[in-house]
Amino acid sequence: MPDLSNFTKPIEWEITHSASQVPIAVIRKLKLGPGQVLYFRAVTWNADVRKRELIGYWGSLAEATQNVYGLYERKLPPQKLASSGSTWREPLPLTKPKAPPAS
């Protein structure tokens, strides 16, 4: 297959949350390892890409997003997780990150 790096761009999403004025994370779709296994890598958001920190790798965009929200919501004060009817909810559940591909 020809090198398409000059013609393609990575697929990534900036993840937002209603409790934040800026994105909370960036998720990028990647294919890693000799078998080109699909991964979704989540990093903290920062305007300076050098200051972004790894959150984890997951096997689907939905799972990566759920974990980004779950980790972010665990850092919020409890009142930020109240709905308009003042009912409290738990942060989204976390799942284990996907293991790196075998070399």
Image (tube, helix red, strand yellow):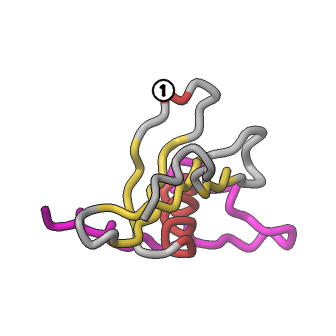
Question: Mark 1 is on which residue type?
Answer: Lys
Q: Residues within 10 Å of mark 1 (few under 14, many from 20)?
A: few
Identify which residue is drawn at 69% across, 44% down.
23
Magenta residues (range)? 74-103
Q: Percent position (x, y) of residue 7?
A: 62, 49
Identify which residue is drawn at 38% across, 61% down.
57
Please check the rendered image and state whether residue 36 is part of the magenta-colored stretch, yes or no: no
Residue at the extreme right: 84
Q: Percent position (x, y) of residue 20?
A: 73, 44
Identify which residue is drawn at 40% across, 71% down.
38
Please check the rendered image and state whether residue 81 is part of the magenta-colored stretch, yes or no: yes
Q: Image quadrant for the N terminus?
A: bottom left
Dot 1 falls on a residue whose secondary structure is helix
Q: Which residue is tagged 1?
A: 51
Q: Count the marks: how many?
A: 1
Displayed quadrant of residue 6 = top right
Residue at the extreme left: 103
Q: Percent position (x, y) of residue 5?
A: 52, 48
Q: Image quadrant for the C terminus?
A: bottom left
Q: Percent position (x, y) of residue 32?
A: 33, 61
Q: From the image, give the main secondary structure of the stretch colored magenta.
A: loop
| Relative vertical location of residue 20 with respect to residue 17 in this rendering, above or below | above
